[in-house]
Amino acid sequence: MGCEERNITWDALAYESDTDCAPRTIQRSMASMDYHKSIACRKAWVSRKLASKRVAYAKMMLERYPTADHWKHVRFSDEVHIGLGPRGKNLIIRKRGQRYCLNCIQRVSDPDEADKRKIHAWAAVGYDFQGPLVFYDVPTNNTGKMSQDVYLNKILKPVVGPWVANNEYFVLEEDQDSGHAPPRTTKTKPYPELKWKEEIGLHSYFNCAGSPDLAIIEDCFQS
C-alpha cells in the first residue's frame, strides 16, 4: 500500500473494498488491528552530498556529546510556519511505529506564492523543558523568513536572555538559517547576535546546514 492509498477516507475504504457498512464500523475494525488515521510524516529529497554531510556532522556531535545525559542540557529551537492556504498535511492509515515507513511519508515541494501566507512562531524544547510559543512577524517579508534584527530583539533578548540570567544550565541549538547569524554569515564581520551571546555567556551551537535531523523540535511541530 503506497502513500496515496493510505490517504483515503473511511467512506472511500468501505466503497473500494465493496463492504456494505458504515464508515465508523470500518474505523473500529481497522483500530482493532492497530491501524489508525495519523498525520503523514513529510520528507523532502536528500542528495548524496547532503546525506554524507549529515553523517559527518552526526559523528562530530556524538564525539562532543557522547552520552544521553549530555543531550539533556540541549534546548532545541526552531521556527514553525502555519499555512493559511488550502494545502495541508495528509491523514493516512498506518500502524503505530510506521511513521517513517516509506509508504507513510508525504512528499512535499516548494509552495506557490499564493500559499505562503502564514502565521509564524518560535519555540524551544529539551529534556524536561518546554519554552513558550513566541509568535512574531518580520516587517521585511510575509513568508516568515527570520531576520537577524527580529531574532535578536524579539527572541534572544526577551526569551532566551532570562534563562541565562536565571543561571539555567543549557546549550541552545539553532539551525543555520541566515537570520540566526550562523558562522557562514559572520566570516566578514561580527554580527550583533554573536556579540550579545558572548556578552551574556550564552552557550549555543548550530545544527548541520540543511538538516533538522538532530533537532527534536521538528517532530514536535509535525505531531
Image: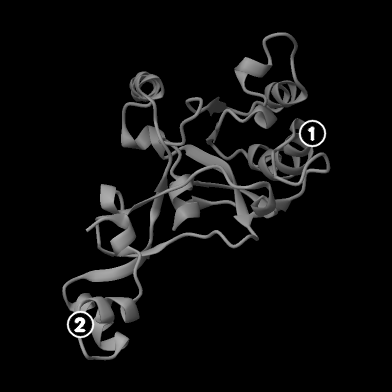
Place of residue 12 in the rendered image (x, y in percent of width and height, measured from the top left): 32, 77
Q: Amino acid at mark 2?
A: Asp
The answer to whether marks 1 and 2 mark residues whose Cβ atoms lie closer than 8 Å is: no
Q: Residue furthest bottom?
A: 21
Q: Circle 1 — which element?
A: helix
Q: Alpha-carbon neighbours of circle 1 within 10 Å: few (<14), some, or many (≥20)?
A: some
189 left or right of 34 in image: right
Place of residue 190 in the rendered image (x, y in percent of width and height, measured from the top left): 74, 14
Q: Quadrant of residue 16?
A: bottom left
Front in this rendered view, residue 184 or 123: 184
Q: Amino acid at mark 1?
A: Asp
Residue 149's disc is: 1
21 left or right of 187 in image: left
**Nearer to us: label 1 or label 2:** 2
Q: Quadrant of residue 140?
A: top right
Residue wearing tag 2? 18
Q: Circle 2 — which element?
A: loop
The residue at the point 31 percent across, 85 percent down is: 23
The residue at the point 27 percent across, 47 percent down is: 102
Front in this rendered view, residue 191 or 213: 213
Please say if 146 is above or below 98: above
